[in-house]
Image (spheres, grey):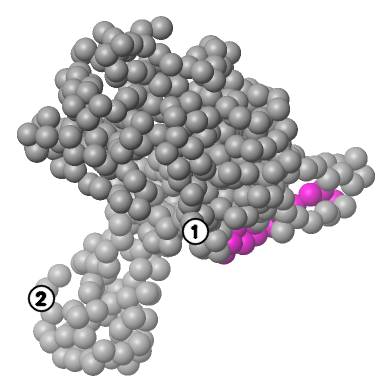
Amino acid sequence: MNFKSHLDEFEVFGKVATAATNLGVKTYVVGGYVRDLVLNRPCKDIDFTCVGSGIELAKEVALQFEGHVPLSVFKNFGTAMLKLDEWELEFVGARKESYRSESRNPIVETGTLLEDLERRDFTINAMAISLNAEDYGELLDPLGGLSDIRKKIIRTPLEPNVTFSDDPLRMLRAVRFAAQLDFDIDGDTFHALSENASRLNIISGERIIVELNKIIQVKKPSYGFKLLFAGKLLHEFFPEMVDLQGVDSVDDKSHKDNFYHTLQVLDNVCLLSDDLWLRWAAILHDIAKPATKRFNKKVGWTFHGHEDKGARMTPEIFRRMKLPMDERMKYVQKLVKLHLRPIALVKNEVTDSAMRRLLFEAGDDIDDLMKLCRADVTSKNNKKVKRYLDNFDNVAQKLLEVEEKDQVRNFQPPISGEEIMAIFGLEPSKIIGDIKEEIKEAILEGKIHNNPIQARELMLEIAKSKGLSPVLDLPNS
Ligand code: ATP
Ligand code: MG
């Protein structure tokens, strides 16, 4: 296979080749870029490996561009990076020892191209394209990456136990690439992965979550999670999710397997949105089912309060998994907490006030909440699914109507605390909060509409009952 015409298309390869010739070092395009080129996936990161100093090569390439490309040098790693428009070019010398080993004293020895490729994670990531005059554009594939791409297989270049013990993160990367590319993991590789799963414990949470989030962001993440589960990797960093698996039966009554249900909900939500955090809400929506599971002779299995307990578990899971402890966590927590509420609104006799309360609590996340609820319908009976989804269409329509009338989705109090203080000549005190709360409640209950005129009338009534009278003349309403 020859990629000369691809190299000729982009100026950058010619410049790197010239720089390499000037320095007299053999240079290759390697890794993900070559893989993605074969797979016809666009890729903006190019890794160059040379048999020599990557930093010197990068400097020489920068000269070829007359210094117009910003250069960053990472001396400790022996790498350098150039930014060229939307491209990121990384330069490194061929290595013999542990690739990107992050142990305290990485022994990184200069090696040949073959030694460098062997130290990579998978055969599909261990191909190179020559930039050298004698075989410019030729694919060098000593480890059989091309054939594995054709067979759609993830396989380590060396004996898998060696590859995985050098850097256990590669086990997660195996699953990640399988999930992204929809490949199988080779039998021996998968066997070694399950044998070495517990070695993940030396990998930092920060590195793990990067891979996990990549698995979650593929088109159909259930496959990745099934591999994580089967390889016992999930057990190492996400035991709460493992606990979802399994079915209990009492008196011939069994509940559904919440692990596979959760995966189905996750896949469903992925059809509706690319948002990582909505996907996390799907993953966590039933996370407290094992902890709240009860059996009741009359009604069978129940999971009362799993939404509240799940919301309480969310911050701890986020903290441990090194997910962000900011408004993104709050968003996931809110969706977990509210995930049953739209279902309760499906019944015909539901009041507007229940609608207003949900709008008030969900705020701008109401649309995402509705997506999660739709995704949560996982019956195998298509008629049932259709009926449920139609019901949600009705709920969505009613929510729209209620919101149009009362705008509670981004509730702003119709009377401010400052106004109340001025009208009654009060200092800041609890009573002001009480009055505001009563007005808000009256709006949500539908006793008054969300407008300042009705709110003022009610405020005067409330104040009177508390023995307050206005010190200011109010404009006639
Ligand atoms: P992506 O950019 O989509 O994450 P990639 O394959 O380009 O995928 P990078 O992390 O950018 O992955 O790494 C570039 C190349 O470096 C890989 O293709 C692989 O050859 C090598 N590599 C990266 N991380 C490791 C690792 N932990 N072990 C061995 N080789 C690795
Ligand atoms: Mg990359």
Q: Residue at x 10, y 76 (%)?
A: 475
- Mark nearest the camera among 2 and 1 is 1
Q: Residue beneath label 1, please?
A: 104
Does the magenta-highlighted stretch encompass residue 369? Answer: no
User: Is 229 positioned to the left or the right of 476 in the image?
Assistant: right
Residue placed under numbered mark 2 in the picture: 475
Q: Residues within 10 Å of mark 2 (few under 14, many from 20)?
A: few
- Crowdedness near tag 1: few (<14), some (14–19) or many (≥20) residues, C-alpha within 10 Å: few
Describe the element under mark 2 as helix, strand or loop. Answer: loop
Q: Residue at x 26, y 89 (%)?
A: 428
User: Which corner quadrant holds the N terminus?
Assistant: top left
Which contiguous range is marked in magenta? 298-313
Q: Please, what is the three-letter code of the amino acid marked with disc 2?
A: Pro
The residue at the point 34 percent across, 30 percent down is 50
Q: Quadrant of residue 191?
A: top right
Estimate the x, y position of residue 305 in percent, counting from the top left. 65, 59
Q: Can you name the residue that lies furthest to the front here?
A: 24
Give the SS element for disc 1. loop
Q: Is residue 280 visible?
A: no
Q: Does residue 331 sit above or below 228 in this rendering?
A: below
